[in-house]
Image (cartoon, rainbow, N blue to C red):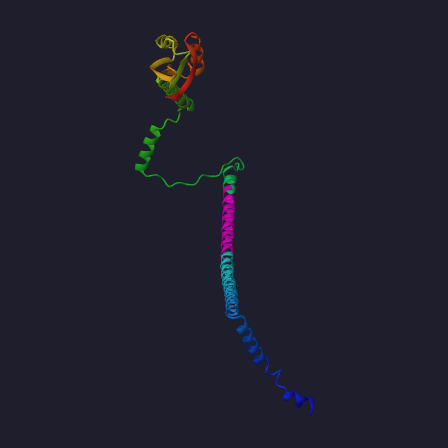
Amino acid sequence: MTAAEGLVQERIWFDKPRYDEAERQFYARMNGPTQHKQDTGANSILQDIARARENIQKSLAGSGGDGAADYGELKARMKNLELENQSLHKVVEDLRSALSKMESRVSALEKRSIRPAVNGTSPAPPQKAPPTPAKEEEEDEDEDDIDLFGSDEEVDKEAERLKEQRLQEYAAKKAKKTALIAKSSILLDVKPWDDETDMAKLEECVRSVQVDGLLWGASKLVPVGYGIKKLQINCVVEDDKVGTDFLEEEITKFEDYVQSVDVAAFNKI
C-alpha cells in the first residue's frame, strides 16, 4: 500500500469540520444556555461593528462627492472672475486711450489760441454771415442795455456793502437771543446734632443763605431714628454761579444746629 492510498483511506482529516461541530455541541451541552447567550452577545457586537463600518464608508463616499462638487463650482467661479478681469482691463485701456486723445486735442487747442501773430498780423477771424435787419435792431438794443464802461470796482463795493449789512443784521439778531442758562435741581439732607435741636430754627438758618442764582424750594422733616429728624430741602441753582460745595460750606457754618449736609439728589434742568 502506498502513502497516497493510505491517505485516501484515512478519513479523520477530511471529516474535521464534523468533529469540530460535535465538539462544540458537546461543550455547549456541558456549559448550558449561558454559552449561547454569550455567543448571541458577541454576534450582536459584531453586527454593530459591521453596521458602523458600513456607515463610515457611506459617509466617506458622500463627503468625497460633495468635495468634488465644491471643487467644480470653485473652478467655474474662478474662470468667471478671470473673464470679468479681462473685460475690465479692456475697458480701462479704452478709457486711457480716449483720455490721451482728449488731452492731445486740448493741448493743440491751447497752443492754437496762444500762438502769437506772425509778421505783425493776427489770424483772420472766421467770417460771419451778414445779420438780418431784425437781428441788427435786437443787437443794438442789447448793446444799449450793456454798460461797456461799467467798473468792476463798483460791483465789488456793492457786494462788500451787502456783505457788511448782512453781518450786522446777523449780529443784531444773535444779540437779541437770550443765552441759555444751565440750571440744576438739588435735594439736600441737613442733619441736626440730636433730637433736641430746634428744626424750625435750623430751616430758617438754611434759608438765610441767599446768593444770586439760588432759589430755595419745598422742604420737609424726615425721621432718621431715635426721635431724630433731618431737614430735606430742595433748591434750584444756576450752574455757573452756585455749586454744591458752596452750599455745604455756607450751611455748615451754622454749627450750633447743623451736624452735616449731604446731597440726596442732583438733576439737570
Q: Nearer the viewer, residue 109 or 257?
A: 257
Point out the stretch of residues depicted in magenta. 79-106
In the rendered image, the residue lying farthest to the left is: 134
Q: Is residue 9 above or below residue 197?
A: below
Q: Residue at x 32, y 37 (%)?
A: 135
Magenta stretch contains residue 118: no
Q: Is residue 94 magenta?
A: yes
Left or right of 134, for residue 11:
right
Quadrant (top left, top right, bottom left, bottom right) of the C terminus: top left
Image quadrant where residue 187 sits: top left
Q: Residue 191: horizontal and vertical position, in percent?
A: 41, 14
Looking at the rendered structure, the number of numbered marks drawn on it comes to: 0
Residue 48 seen in render: yes
Please say if 130 is above or below 26. above
Query: Horizontal and vertical percent for residue 213?
Result: 38, 13
Judged left or right of residue 122, residue 194 is left
